[in-house]
């Protein structure tokens, strides 16, 4: 049996799945002050429902890292940067406690300038004086040669063995120095909190004598093992929207062009499916307005949901963003968006009479009647969602996958359907679809779709290999791996692909996902000749290979 648990802003959902049917589902209020307790409460309910059955796999989707970044409550972190020549240094001042060092690598991985140990020592002493014990080290082009990053780390640890050091080449190995800085910094900032959380989860599972595989859902809709996640905490951001996207696909198995709306208590998460496949953010996930090297779906979350309170002030009807608790019909003390839809459409959610009473109290002596109140709130909700979708379509038009679809099909992308999931989807989606003049679908188990999406998502791994035969080296954008290559004179594209696949299989084996390695596919194959005089001096190959997101091998859908 399989378990999936998704921590949402309002509720944490869980499912127990036997490969064909959902045996049990659980929904518990999320304790934002202690996500671990909420997770374990849901887990214990599901274990009880399993009646002693063997659990093979558990997948968590959690907001821990997202919350740390949103509240800036991670560890205070310093940055040591080696940008070399090029842009002015102040172009890289994204974060406080940033120090610049000598040392540079060129775009082909050749050493141009060595590190100055004295300079590193002075920077470390200045960092320690500020009470900081975590450092991110990033060198431009370290993904082609990480010698300088490793040298700086060695010097730091010789000065203070207790200092926590994260280097860019082992965290984000792709080109683009700015994105590697951002990714490495946020990874360092959140690593200790995530590591503590993951160890607590492991200990709690061991205490329950659970021997299952434990995976974490990533922003790209795939999973990674709990131990691997400790060095890549930022890959767990936006796992909620990823879970909702994968859950929508899992429940509908639908090839249409669709928008997925996950409507919860506090947010609406929006994503796009092109013929049933999720659209990716080609520039990577965005954290606080900065692009990163984290693979992620192209999604948007807006602060709007069923628990948004309704207020009337000076005759103006307002949607508030700060949650005051559940809807009145579900035992809350204040009327919400859910109560408005409950009243207008006779949805019979919870106790409808409580919706009516709280809304009536709200408009008493204001001169506003119930019909006006409900219509105004509905218009505000739909306008907000529609405006966001329009904005996203403008952004999506610049995504390569979106444009390729239009070229291949010879027509503009046309939205066919809205897929609604989440606790409040049945209230919101029908009217919105009618307004937008598209079909809609709210599948069975829509209220726990996120948990199912996490449960049945398979592990993912993507790596890009850069091979330079003239310099006799290759480097991989995963874990800082680089090495020499033999037989450079006879090296061809087929050899490059074999090398890439060999490394993917080795990394997949280390991460416990070797059973999916034979499903890997190449997404990039490029070759460039290096010319000196009239002769070819060498070749550069760029090879990308991946185990792409999808479902575990045994998943064929949910039986009714």
Image: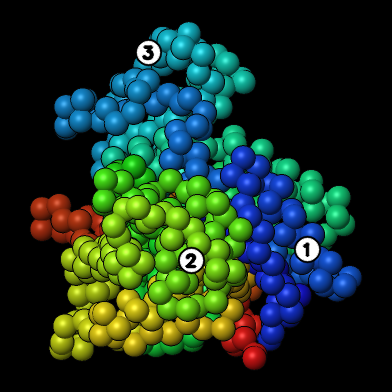
Choose between 97 and 50: the one closer to the eye. Answer: 50
Question: In x, y percent, where is residue 59?
Answer: 65, 63
Question: In x, y percent, where is residue 459?
Answer: 57, 66
| Pair 2/3: label in front | 2
Disc 2 from disc 1: Cα separation:
34 Å
Choose between 385 and 398: the one closer to the eye. Answer: 385
Quadrant position of the C terminus in the picture: bottom right
The residue most toward the left is: 534
Residue at x 24%, y 74% (from the top left corner): 402
In the image: residue 526, left or right of residue 60:
left
Above or below residue 2? Residue 291 is: above
Q: Which mark is residue 298?
A: none
- Confirm whether residue 304 shows in the render: yes
SS of the residue under disc 1: helix
Q: Which residue is mark 3?
A: 119
| Pair 1/3: label in front | 1
Task: Name the N-terminal-most of marks 1 and 3.
Answer: 1
Q: Which residue is mark 2?
A: 356
Disc 1 from disc 3: Cα separation:
56 Å
Task: Name the N-terminal-most of marks 2 and 1.
Answer: 1
SS of the residue under disc 2: helix
Q: Bin the neighbour count of mark 1 within 10 Å (Cα to Cα): few under 14, some 14-19, many 20 and up.
A: some
Above or below residue 92? Residue 264 is: below
Question: In x, y percent, where is residue 317?
Answer: 30, 54
Question: In x, y percent, where is residue 274?
Answer: 33, 80
- Confirm whether residue 217 shows in the render: no
The residue most toward the front is: 365
In the image: residue 205, left or right of residue 438:
right
Q: Which residue is mark 1?
A: 45
In the image: residue 121, left or right of residue 58:
left
């Amino acid at each position: 049996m399989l378990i999936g648990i998704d921590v949402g802003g309002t509720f944490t959902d869980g499912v127990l799945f036997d490969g064909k049917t959902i045996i049990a589902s659980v929904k518990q209020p999320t304790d934002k002050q202690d996500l671990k307790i909420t997770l374990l409460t849901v887990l214990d309910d599901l274990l009880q429902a399993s009646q002693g059955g063997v659990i093979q796999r558990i997948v968590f989707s959690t907001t821990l890292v997202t919350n740390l970044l949103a509240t800036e409550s991670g560890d205070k972190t310093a940055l040591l940067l080696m940008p070399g020549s090029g842009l002015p240094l102040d172009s890289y001042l994204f974060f406080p406690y940033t120090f610049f060092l000598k040392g540079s690598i060129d775009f082909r991985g050749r050493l141009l300038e060595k590190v100055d140990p004295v300079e590193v020592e002075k920077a470390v002493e200045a960092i320690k004086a500020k009470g900081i014990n975590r450092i991110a080290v990033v060198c431009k082009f370290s993904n082609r040669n990480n010698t300088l990053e490793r040298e700086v780390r060695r010097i730091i640890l010789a000065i203070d063995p207790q200092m926590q050091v994260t280097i860019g080449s082992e965290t984000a190995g792709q080109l683009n120095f700015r994105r590697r800085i951002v990714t490495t910094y946020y990874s360092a900032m959140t690593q200790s909190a995530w590591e503590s959380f993951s160890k607590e989860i492991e200990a709690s599972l061991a205490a329950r004598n659970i021997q299952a595989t434990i995976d974490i859902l990533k922003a790209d809709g795939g999973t990674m093992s709990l131990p691997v996640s400790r060095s890549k905490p930022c890959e767990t951001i936006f796992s909620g929207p990823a879970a909702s996207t994968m859950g929508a696909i899992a429940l509908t198995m639908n090839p249409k062009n669709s928008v997925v709306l996950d409507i919860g208590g506090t947010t609406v998460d929006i994503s796009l499916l092109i013929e049933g496949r999720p659209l990716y953010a080609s520039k990577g996930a965005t954290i606080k307005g900065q692009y990163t090297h984290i693979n992620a779906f192209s999604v948007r979350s807006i602060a709007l949901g069923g628990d948004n309170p309704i207020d009337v002030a000076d005759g103006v009807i307002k949607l508030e963003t700060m949650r005051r608790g559940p809807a009145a019909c579900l035992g809350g003390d204040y009327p919400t968006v859910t109560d408005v839809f409950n009243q207008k459409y006779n949805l019979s959610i919870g106790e409808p009479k409580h919706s009516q009473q709280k809304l009536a109290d709200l408009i008493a002596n204001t001169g506003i009647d119930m019909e006006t109140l409900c219509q105004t709130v509905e218009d505000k909700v739909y306008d907000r969602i529609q405006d966001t979708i329009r904005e996203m379509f403008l952004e999506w038009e610049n995504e390569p996958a979106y444009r390729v679809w239009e070229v291949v099909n010879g027509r503009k992308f046309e939205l066919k359907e809205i897929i609604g999931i989440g606790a409040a989807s049945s209230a919101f989606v029908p009217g919105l679809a009618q307004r937008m003049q598209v079909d809609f679908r709210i599948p069975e188990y829509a209220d726990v779709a996120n948990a199912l999406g996490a449960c049945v998502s398979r592990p993912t791994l993507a790596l890009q290999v850069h091979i330079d035969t003239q310099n006799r080296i290759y480097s991989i954008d995963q874990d800082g791996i680089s090495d020499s290559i033999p037989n450079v004179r006879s090296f061809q594209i087929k050899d490059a692909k074999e090398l890439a696949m060999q490394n993917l299989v080795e990394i997949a084996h280390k991460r416990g996902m070797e059973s999916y390695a034979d499903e890997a596919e190449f997404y990039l194959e490029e070759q460039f000749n290096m010319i000196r005089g009239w002769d070819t001096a060498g070749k550069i190959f760029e090879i990308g290979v991946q185990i792409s997101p999808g479902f575990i091998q045994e998943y064929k859908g949910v039986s009714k």
